[in-house]
Image (spheres, helix red, strand yellow):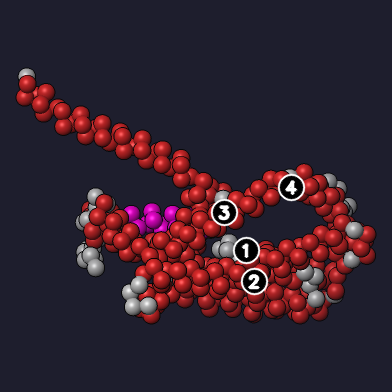
Amino acid sequence: MPDENKNSIPHLQAWFLAALIIIAVVINYLVLAPYLAALFVAVIFAVSWNPVNNWLLRLFKGKGAIAAFFSVILLVVVILLPFLLFGYIILEDARRLYIELSSGSFDKSALSGLFDNLKSRFGQFLPGVSFEPAVYIREAASFITSNVGRIFSGFVFFVFQAFLMLLALFYFFKDGTKLRKSIVMWSPLDDGYDEIILDKLKNAINSVVRGVLLVALAQGVVSGVGYSVLGVPNPVLWAAVTAVAALIPTVGTSIVIAPIIAYLFFASGLGPAVGLLIWGVAAVGLVDNLLAPILINRGLHIHPLFILLSVLGGIIFFGPIGFLAGPVSLSLLFAFLDVYKLASGTETLPPPKLQ
């Protein structure tokens, strides 16, 4: 009898310790939950910007803190500042469009003529559809006015999140190698399996950031050139919308370019509409067909349908960062499945050795 009690004590201690660990994990998750988005974006940048950090590390002869500091500075100068400047231009473009639509000048604009044309052509077939955009504009203005305080507080929180992201990014650059070794050490899986998972995640992040985002940005820039040349109002704004639409696989930029072609047809005639159609197929489509297979498929061997679902579901579940978190989460699942095939013996290739 004493022997049984003696043997049951370590078992009870193990369960008690596991319960304490679970409680601690839940508490820390609740504490860190408001900042997980900033930490996730920092991880994304740390992986995709790591070659620059490695170059600076060699330049400064292994001084990790100095290399990490200048890596963050270069990231701010090369990516974040142009992004903020581009965002300011988009907001100015949107503000001018709003002023035009909400003021009396809308009645004389080409966009008003387009809606009048649509109303005269299709109004009788669609009696329940409103062709009065000014009504929606006034509702949007009323919503913005009544939520100014919430918008301002959201902007302040965004600035704080950006600062936290840069701070976390500095430590990821400085201690990234140590963090990776700690993950491998604490994981109960074989070190070779851990390396497979981490490498696949790194390839997925690089494919999403350098592939999906770069292709979307290139398509937005190319489409913006066509909008400017062919006389589309507010070309920068619509170029940004086109770049966002390019993140959606399969349909992509067509969901934005097609309505703009229709607008040009009604507002400016057949020539500009045909010109934008040719530009969209030849230039914008060429960017997608040339860059996407090179940049995306190198590390993200997932069917486009699953990528589309992961992007849409990621945005619904994670919010704005879901277009990154969705594909990365899906890649994590496929990495686990690959490790399972190796561990179960269904895959003949052995796991790579720990580097």
Badge number at residue 160: 3
Residue 160: image location, x then y, percent: 57, 54
The part of the chain drawn in magenta is 324-336
Instruction: Tell me the SS state at disc 2.
Output: helix
Q: Do the residues labelled 3 and 4 touch (CB within 8 Å)?
A: no
Looking at the image, is mark 4 or mark 1 nearer the viewer?
A: 4
Name the residue carrying label 1.
244
Q: Do the residues labelled 1 and 2 touch (CB within 8 Å)?
A: yes
Looking at the image, is mark 2 or mark 4 nearer the viewer?
A: 4
Q: In this view, does 140 lie to the left or right of 185?
A: right
Badge number at residue 158: none
Q: Type of residue at label 3?
A: Phe
Residue neighbourhood size for the residue with mark 4, other residues' Cα within 10 Å, grouped as few (<14), some (14–19), many (≥20)? few
Residue 184 appears in view: yes
Looking at the image, is mark 1 or mark 3 nearer the viewer?
A: 3
- Going from the N terminus, do you reach mark 3 or mark 4 first? 4
Name the residue carrying label 4.
148
Name the residue carrying label 2.
220
Question: Image height check: is 222 above or below 141?
Answer: below
- Going from the N terminus, do you reach mark 4 or mark 1 first? 4
Question: Image height check: is 11 above or below 294?
Answer: above
Instruction: Tell me the SS state at disc 3.
Output: helix
Q: In this view, does 197 lie to the left or right of 68?
A: left
- Going from the N terminus, do you reach mark 1 or mark 3 first? 3
